[in-house]
Every structure is written in structure tokens, then in C-alpha cells.
Image (cartoon, rainbow, N blue to C red):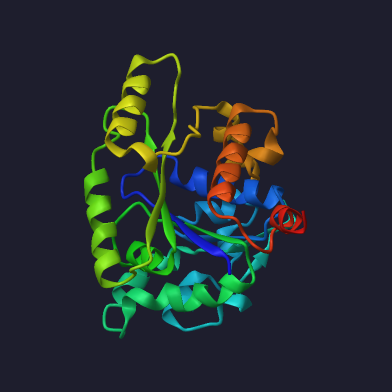
Amino acid sequence: MGKIIAVANQKGGVGKTTSAINLAASLAALEYRTLLVDADPQANATSGVGFDPKDIENSIYECMVDGINAQDIILQTQVLPHLDLMPSHIDLVGAEVEMINLPNREEKMKDALRPLAELYDFIIIDCSPSLGLITVNALTAAHSVIVPVQCEYFALEGLGKLLNTIKIIQSRLNEELEIEGILLTMYDVRLRLSNQVVEEVKLHFQQLVFDTIIPRNVKLSESPSFGIPVILHDAESKGSISYLNLAREIVEKNIVASAPEAAEDTAA
């Protein structure tokens, strides 16, 4: 059974989509069957792995609103053999209004994704920068959530709100939801402020903070314009190495029975 991980923060510009794309790509590069779910109407994760959102006929919107089978809309990426995509479309903007009167509207994404967990080792959901119904759907569907936090002055702004939302979802909609970890992003070793934010976040959240910290990196910023993850744009860049380290850290926390490494360990 695969692990469903949402990447969520209602604050924009914290590296959420960058983290979702490159974590999914890094897991795929490690030969784990990985599905990247684009649950953001901006569809940046869709374009970030080489698809034009304008050419998408069926997206996660049709799964949630019209009940289309999720397996029918999955696209195989050309960038990595173990990476698939469930695309998004601008139509997703209207999904919250259209779903408002649907029964169990918070569980539409869960109904679509949970059956897919048997087909993948990891399912990574890129959430929109809000705490609206689509993000609530993602957190209800997920087993855990990664919270990207920018290493800047307003880093902790809104983090309390998100953690409260997670607690509400744990108590009302998804008891098994856990915090996979807080991911520090856009770290600049030259700035005292970046180091202060790292210290403060680690002081407040301790074991919840990933050991891996994502640095500011030009290659990370460039790769979306080529429609490829950073690991294919420049495998030796600091950004690429950091996301591979994050993927390994997550794999160590979640030993996946069907993964090659786990099978070898069992045989040994």
C-alpha cells in the first residue's frame, strides 16, 4: 500500500510546487513508483513535468466533480519512467463552488486517490496556496503532510493556522493524518536571517523538522521553464542533491514493502 503525502502551506511562494515536483521526481529516480497529483488550479506541477495544461482534456477536476475514474486520467511522464501525473486544469478554480452541495464533499479526492495507493509506492499531492475545500480534500485523502517553510522573516506567519487546520481534519475527517515533516526551503547560508529562522523552527518543532534543508538555487528556478525536474536539468546542482536527500530521508521513514531496497533487505 503506497503512502499518500500532501505538500501544503496556505502561504504562497514557499517552494511548495517546486518541492512537490522535485520530491516526486527524486523518488521516481530512486525507482519508486510515484504519482504526482496536481491539485492546484494554476497547474504549475503539470507544466513542470512537461505537459501543457491547455492540452489537458480530463484532470483531477473531472475526478472530483464528475466522478471520472482516476486511472483514466493518469498520464505517463516522458521525463522519468517511474513518474506518472494526475494533471490539473484552470477549471479546478470552480470546483469548490460546484462541490458545495455535494454529499461528503471533503472526501472526493480521497475516493479518487485511495484505490490508486495499491499501484504506487508514493503519491505526492501539490496543494493550492489556500485552506479552501480543495486543500481540505487533499489533507483528507493523505496519510501525511509535508509543510514547506521559507527561510525568511515571515516564515512562521500562518504556520499556526495550517497546523490548526490539520488538527481539525485529524479530529473530524482523517484520524490517520500525520505531519510527515516541516521542510525548510530557500535557505541562504550567507544570510544571518536564514540561520535564525532555521534555529527558531527547529527550536519550536524539533523532531518534526526534516534534516534536509533546500537551498536557494538557480537551477531549481530554471528547470520549470524547460518542463523538467531539476534532477534532469542539472543532476549535480545543490537543489537536485537536496531533493534526492529529502527523498531518501522520507524513504527511510517509510519503508515501502514493494520497493527494490526493501525487498533486498528482506532477502538479506
In this view, 6 is above or below 252: below
Q: Nearer the viewer, residue 81 or 203?
A: 203
Q: Residue at x 42, y 67 (%)?
A: 92
The reply, left or right, for residue 169 in relation to residue 257 is left
Q: Quadrant of residue 233?
A: top right
Placement of 68 over or under 187, stated as above or below: below
Residue 90 seen in the current view: yes
- Specify whether 150 is left or right of 248: left
Q: In the visual, does 155 lie left or right of 13?
A: left
Q: Residue at x 44, y 74 (%)?
A: 110
**Residue 263 at x, y percent in the picture:** 73, 59
The quarter of the displayed image where residue 167 is located = bottom left
Q: Nearer the viewer, residue 19 or 226?
A: 19
Q: Position of residue 67 (x, y in %)?
A: 48, 84
User: Is residue 57 something that shows in the picture?
Assistant: no
x and y percent of residue 184 in the render?
42, 35
In this view, the residue in front, 224 or 142, is 142
The residue shown at (31%, 67%) is: 133
Q: Is residue 202 above or below residue 143?
A: above
- Residue drawn 44% across and 30% down? 186
Residue 108 in percent (x, y) is at: 40, 77
Quadrant placement of the N terminus: bottom right
